[in-house]
């Protein structure tokens, strides 16, 4: 839903159907591979391989033409080079940031996340949407002011 609502804020025109497919495929693979707390550097390094293995297995269950088409879209998302992939990646980062913000920084506080970490992890939002990155930065600043993120 956010993809549809925020489409106008993409840095470049995007095929919104493809963006939605990317987000759904990414989530399916992530569910199978298991999610990783994005601020856990060691776990994040292993996550890429786990997700690739999950994608190969899941898309390999489908008829070859369908599996290859979906695997190609998933890989495009992971490479984050097309306008659609950049925008999808921006949304994928923004959603957990909004969740943290609206639950008074619960997981940021529990995991002692710093302002620098929040900026580093979420800066890829800028590649897909400058407008959404500007909003994300203001949320980070407010989270620091509220004591939810360490500075």
Image (cartoon, rainbow, N blue to C red):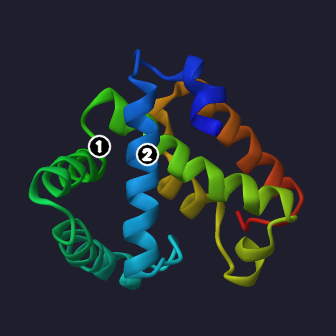
Q: Is residue 133 visible?
A: no
The number of numbered badges drawn on the structure is 2
In-front residue for pair 29/111: 29
CB under 8 Å between discs 2 and 1: yes
Q: Residue at x 42, y 70 (%)?
A: 30
**Position of 22 relative to 8 (above/below):** below
Q: Quadrant of residue 105?
A: bottom right
Where is residue 3? Give x, y as percent.
57, 35
Q: Residue at x 53, y 76 (%)?
A: 37
Q: Position of residue 68 (x, y in %)?
A: 13, 53
Q: Quadrant of the N terminus?
A: top right
Query: Residue 89: which numbered mark, if any?
Result: 2
Label 1: how many residues lie within 10 Å, few (<14), some (14-19) or many (20+)? some
2 or 1: tag closer to the N-terminus: 1
Percent across and percent down for residue 75 are 21, 52
Placement of the C terminus among the 4 image quadrants: bottom right
Q: Residue sitting at 76 percent across and 45 percent down?
A: 139
Q: Position of residue 100 (x, y in %)?
A: 75, 62
Query: What separation in Å lies between label 2 and label 1 (alpha carbons)?
Result: 7 Å
* Residue bearing mark 1: 80
Q: Secondary structure at mark 2?
A: helix
Residue 8 appears in the figure: yes
| Residue neighbourhood size for the residue with mark 2, other residues' Cα within 10 Å, grouped as few (<14), some (14–19), many (≥20) | many
């Amino acid at each position: 839903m956010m993809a549809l609502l925020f489409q106008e804020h993409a840095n470049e025109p995007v095929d919104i159907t493809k963006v939605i497919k990317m987000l759904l495929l990414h989530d399916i693979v992530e569910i199978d591979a298991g999610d990783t707390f994005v601020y856990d550097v060691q776990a994040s390094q292993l996550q890429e391989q786990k997700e690739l293995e999950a994608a190969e297995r899941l898309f390999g269950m489908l008829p070859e033409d369908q599996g290859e088409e979906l695997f190609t879209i998933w890989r495009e998302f992971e490479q984050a080079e097309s306008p659609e992939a950049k925008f999808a990646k921006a949304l994928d980062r923004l959603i957990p940031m909004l969740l943290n913000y609206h639950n008074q920084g619960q997981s940021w506080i529990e995991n002692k996340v710093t302002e620098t970490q929040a900026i580093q992890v979420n800066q890829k939002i800028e590649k897909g949407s400058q407008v959404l990155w500007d909003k994300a930065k203001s949320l980070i600043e407010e989270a620091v002011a509220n004591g939810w993120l360490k500075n």
